[in-house]
Amino acid sequence: MTVEENGIDETIWSGNVYLMILRNLFMFLSAFVLSACTAASETPQSHAPAKIGTLIDLEPIQAKGLPPQRVTIWLPPGYERSDTRYPVLYMHDAQNLFDPALSNYSKIWKADQVMHAVSENGDIREHIIIGLWHPGAARYRQYLPQKLYDRAHDALRKSMDEHAGGEPIMSDAYLAFIVDQLKPMIDRDYRTLTGRSDTSMAGSSMGGLISFYALGEYPDVFGRVAAVSIHWPLADPGKAPALDPQIAALWKDYIVRDLGKPDGRRLWMDHGTETLDAFYPPYQVYIDTALAEAGWQQDHDFTSRTYEGAEHDEIAWNTRLPEIFRWLLSEDEGQTEQ
């Protein structure tokens, strides 16, 4: 860093020993501060203390076929004071769940605060939340359902490949990591309830896609799923008509062949009407019909909500998260496993 870069005329310092000493001291302190800031930016950020409960950051986990996976665990405030076992909710995009300092644009779900508030009212049992961080540029590849990619027509697959940067899709490896590696570790190290009805998943946008996909690929593991502002168009919605019939056919095929009948599972879906969410309503109407034809009963096995004026961001998702939790995680007889 030069003196001129700070807007200071170099000639001010010439011929004055005292000022030269001050200049050298200033330069030393400036370099020290710059070095400290640079080091801080290169160090992974840690969470601010949780406002409610406890946040635990695990060391990055090596997983086959994936970038190192970063996981943040939220333990309810009563966890340390009891021997209670807790149901577990797996959530994607953990950067945006708890701490605004780590999120995009300082927008977060406040998932921990909402979970505690809703459970304090007695509406649901409090859950442990497992937050899975997305891997940056590889997020699309990690969240795009592999089977829909494999079955896509050429033009759609080309669009998917563009979004993936020509790299392979790795959603099957991601779900296998959660089911075969992460969940056994969580169930071993923490007091969890391990059954299907006590194991849920939630995510938004592409995170909604991988959540819906998990319900179909692991029906014996995940009993409850929230697909929030789910990105039904799969790639760039601006390159497709309001309802691309080939994309719609892909989804119906997956629902019939892979998702199957509800068999006690529960599915929440929703969308707003602004920004990216404005592309989703025609798809949601089609999906609702396909689910009904596959034996899913509206407002019993699944629900589909529209939020007028809501945008595609964490502020909107936080606003409706209490409603999501109450419906999805409720133990009401009308919504529990049969």
Image (tube, helix red, strand yellow):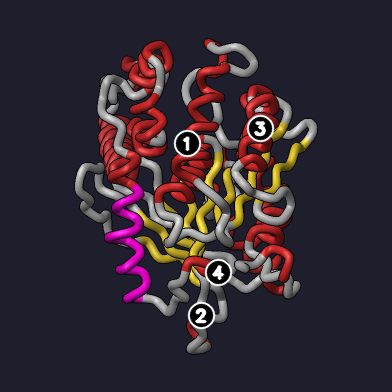
246 above or below 146? above
Q: Residue at x 60, y 56 (%)?
A: 266
* Cα–Cα gap, marks 3 and 4: 28 Å
Please tell me in which quadrant of the rendered image residue 324 appears. Answer: bottom right
Which of 150 and 327 lies nearest the eye of the viewer?
150
Identify the secondary structure beneath mark 4: loop
Q: Which residues are the magenta region?
A: 175-189
Q: In which quadrant is the C terminus drawn?
A: bottom right
Q: Which residue is mark 3?
A: 284
Can residue 54 be seen from the camera position used here? Answer: no
* Cα–Cα gap, marks 2 and 1: 39 Å
Confirm or deny contact between disc 4 and disc 1 (CB under 8 A): no
Q: Amino acid at mark 3?
A: Gln
Q: Residue at x 37, y 73 (%)?
A: 187
Q: Which mark is residue 79?
A: 2
- Look at discs 4 and 1 and give the one toward the viewer: 1
Q: Within 10 Å of the Cα at label 2, are there few (<14), some (14-19), or many (20+) other Cα atoms?
A: some
* Cα–Cα gap, marks 4 and 1: 30 Å
99 above or below 163? below
> Of callouts 3 and 2, which one flags the residue occurring earlier in the amino acid sequence?
2
Please state if 284 lies on the left or on the right of 218 as rendered: right
> Of callouts 2 and 1, which one flags the residue occurring earlier in the amino acid sequence?
2
- Look at discs 1 and 3 and give the one toward the viewer: 1
* Cα–Cα gap, marks 2 and 4: 10 Å
Q: Is residue 288 magenta?
A: no
